[in-house]
């Protein structure tokens, strides 16, 4: 594995870990010692080669497809990715259930599937937003505005939706 590729792979690993709100020691604790902080850190820095098997296991631990961890094929990387869609679960808990019930159930299902119960934030994908838009019988952009008005999504989410609709 080239050192540039290893660094790009490491950057992806670090991005997924931090997106989930985990420190290196948090990974070690959450995995009950299966993933040592020093090993994950060396993968993230590109100092240590990761086997395909270990990468698949790490992807499973993070609850993401392996391809999400692989660097892109465009030289130098692609254009700046759109902002992440991150639900503020603490604020969601304060939105009346008659408004937010479907979103609360959907978020709980994602948390269950990922085994991610930090309770503060939850990253969702564009596909999740499209599914929620169908549930709420709104376009993704209208639903995004509604979620921003509830304080559940950051205003930067508008750019992610605009990027998707472009």
Image (cartoon, helix red, strand yellow):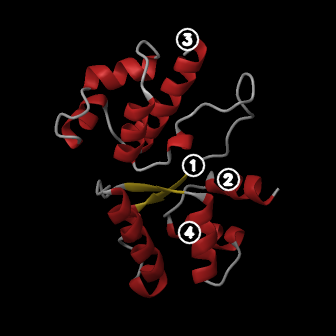
Q: Are marks 3 and 1 in contact (CB under 8 Å)?
A: no
User: Residue beneath label 4, please?
Assistant: 147
Residue shown at 28%/36% (left/top)?
27
The one of 35 and 17 positioned closer to us in this rendering = 35
The residues bearing labels 1 and 2 have C-alpha atoms spaced at a distance of 7 Å
Q: Is residue 43 left or right of residue 80?
A: left
The residues bearing labels 4 and 1 have C-alpha atoms spaced at a distance of 14 Å
The one of 55 and 47 positioned closer to us in this rendering = 55
User: Residue beneath label 2, please?
Assistant: 160
Q: Are marks 2 and 4 in contact (CB under 8 Å)?
A: no
Secondary-structure class at tag 1: loop
Secondary-structure class at tag 4: helix
Q: Earlier in the sequence, mark 4 or mark 1?
A: 1
The residues bearing labels 3 and 2 have C-alpha atoms spaced at a distance of 31 Å
Label 1, residues with CA under 10 Å away: few <14, some 14-19, many ≥20: some
Q: Give the label on residue 84, or none.
A: 1
Q: Are marks 1 and 2 in contact (CB under 8 Å)?
A: yes
Residue shown at 30%/21% (left/top)?
39
Quarter of the view holding residue 139:
bottom right
Q: Are marks 4 and 1 in contact (CB under 8 Å)?
A: no
Quarter of the view holding residue 53:
top left
């Amino acid at each position: 594995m080239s050192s540039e590729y290893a660094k790009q792979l490491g950057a992806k690993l670090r991005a997924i870990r931090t997106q989930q709100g985990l420190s290196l020691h948090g990974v070690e604790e959450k995995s009950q010692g299966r993933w040592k902080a020093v090993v994950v850190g060396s993968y993230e820095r590109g100092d240590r080669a990761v086997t395909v098997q270990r990468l698949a296991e790490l992807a499973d631990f993070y609850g993401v497809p392996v391809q999400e961890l692989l660097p892109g094929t465009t030289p130098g990387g692609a254009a700046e990715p759109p902002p992440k869609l991150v639900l503020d679960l603490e604020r969601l808990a304060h939105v009346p259930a008659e408004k937010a019930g479907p979103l609360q159930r959907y978020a709980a299902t994602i948390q269950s599937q990922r085994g991610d119960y930090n309770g503060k934030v939850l990253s969702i994908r564009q596909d999740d937003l499209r599914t929620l838009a169908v549930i709420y019988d709104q376009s993704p952009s209208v639903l995004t505005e509604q979620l921003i008005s509830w304080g559940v999504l950051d205003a930067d989410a508008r750019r992610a939706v605009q990027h998707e609709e472009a």
